[in-house]
Image (cartoon, rainbow, N blue to C red):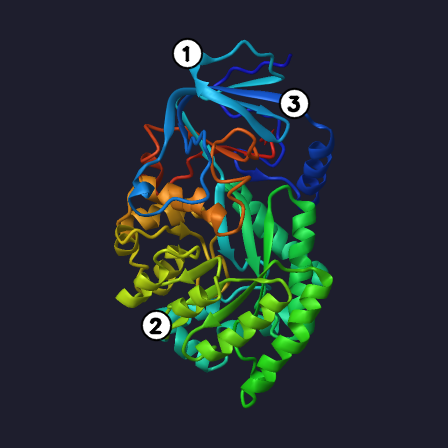
Amino acid sequence: MNVKTHGRAPQRARLCVSNEIIPISGYGRASQRLQKTDHLKILIKNIKQLLQVRDNPVQKVSGADMRSLPLLEDAFLLVEGDRIADYGKMTDLPDTQADEVIDASGRVVLPTWCDSHTHIVYAGNREQEFVDRINGLTYEEIANRGGGILNSAKKLQDTPEDELYEQSAKRLEEVIALGTGAVEIKSGYGLTADAELKMLRVVKKLRAHYGIPVKATFLGAHAIPAAYKSDREGYIDLIINEMIPAVAQEGLAEYVDVFCEKGYFTTEETEAILEAGKAFGLIPKIHVNQFHAIGGVQTGVKYNALSVDHLEVMRDEDIEALKGTETIPVALPSCSYFLSIPYTPARQMIDAGLPLALATDYNPGSTPSGNMNFVVATACIKMKITPEEAINAATINGAYAMGLSDTHGSISRGKKANLIITKEVPGYAYLPYAFGSNHIEQVMINGNIN
């Protein structure tokens, strides 16, 4: 038995040691090999706080229940293969043989973050637009003069698929090292049939090469491309009659999404696209209420969308429309931070009894960061939700927003062993409190500790 009882990070690297990322292809191949052959038992003991412990797993938490973050102090966690096998108080630690023992004294252990809204597959960057905003232009003004999504679409169309994969894989490795253990990636920076399919093929390749769930969303309705500026109906027809069938035929996406917003897609256009997606088995999601409330939330509810995302502008009727539904609201606080736009009124929504998930919106234009730790901290600082609510929103509720509640998002027997082990910290509230520091010592994916 190889036993390690130590305070510092073990040096048996799988993904990173002290957040030093190994080459792209290395982790993908190692991860795939270990999932097939490695059935080690790993015991994590002396855990200061083991968070999100749920003996009876839930799909999501809502309203006042979000203030409750079940935990064990002075705990152990046993991992067998890629699954959580057992946990409990150290006083109840069973006599078990483990291949590796990790001493987590002074450390917090919690499920990895579940990031249900990203656009990680993109080409290049839009740093000049960042400077333009500093100089006074708004996001909408930049978009109206050919920047924004159309700028990214042009770059992506000109980027070969293998190069696009390499750029995207580096971003995915970065967010895994920052504690993300499940991610959704949207298309939408192609805006032609070929480019949209290219994006989704890259997502498929990422899913094959990395050990975390990678959910794919078709977002051809992200913007009207320049070639269809005077022919909106023509582009919507292209989405419905060419893109969606092609995506479905290749099995490239699980979800269909639309940017329902002034200057982008109307509620009527959104309904037509969601309807077409559902006919091919694609589950609706929807970008709504980022700048204006135009009835997009109600459209999402009508089509039983799994999630409605952004929600920076919310009316009382929008909150009411979400009550009693299976549609989860998703807030993207990094986007509000970067664009200096209002934050999702999370406090009002949770107090109204709604669930809430948190995600990064990682993309080149409005949120060039996939750091879920910053998202959790910003939600506490700017949206006035508690650390318990924020962690629930970024774990179990994030898993729900990707259809992963049965396997991810909580410490429950039989769920995937995707875990964050922090450095020594006073307690879990310190994570959002000391927002400028990296508190992660190790990330475990499928039972493979770094």
Is 438 situated left or right of 224 in this image?
A: left
Local crowd size for mark 3, using a 10 Å CA cut-off: few (<14), some (14–19), many (≥20): some
Q: Where is mark 2, residue-wise?
A: 293
Point out residue 20 in the picture as x, y percentages from the top left corner.
56, 38
Asked if residue 204 lies left or right of residue 71, the reply is right
Badges 2 and 3: C-beta atoms under 8 Å apart?
no
The secondary structure type at the circle numbered 2 is loop
Outermost residue, front side: 324
Residue 202, image quadrant: bottom right
Residue 195 seen anywhere in this rendered image of the structure: no
In the image shown, does 396 or 278 lie closer to the viewer? 278
Question: Considering depth in this image, is 215 or 48 the residue closer to the camera?
Answer: 215
For residue 424, above or below residue 227: above
Q: Which residue is mark 1?
A: 91
Separation (CA) of disc 2 from disc 3: 51 Å
Q: Give the distance between the C-alpha atoms of the residues marked 3 and 1, in whole angstroms.
A: 23 Å
Please state the horizontal and vertical placement of residue 312, each as a whole percent of the image: 34, 64
Which residue is labeled 3 in the image?
Answer: 40
The amino acid marked with disc number 1 is Thr
Q: Secondary structure at mark 1?
A: helix
Q: Can residue 324 be spotted in the picture?
A: yes
At 58% across and 21% down in the image, what residue appears? 42
Residue at image location 37% in from the left, 31% down from the top? 70
Q: Is residue 2 above or below residue 127?
A: above
The C terminus lies in quadrant: top right
Label 3's element?
loop
Label 1 CA crowd tier, 10 Å (few <14, some 14–19, many 20+): few
Q: Amino acid at mark 3?
A: Leu
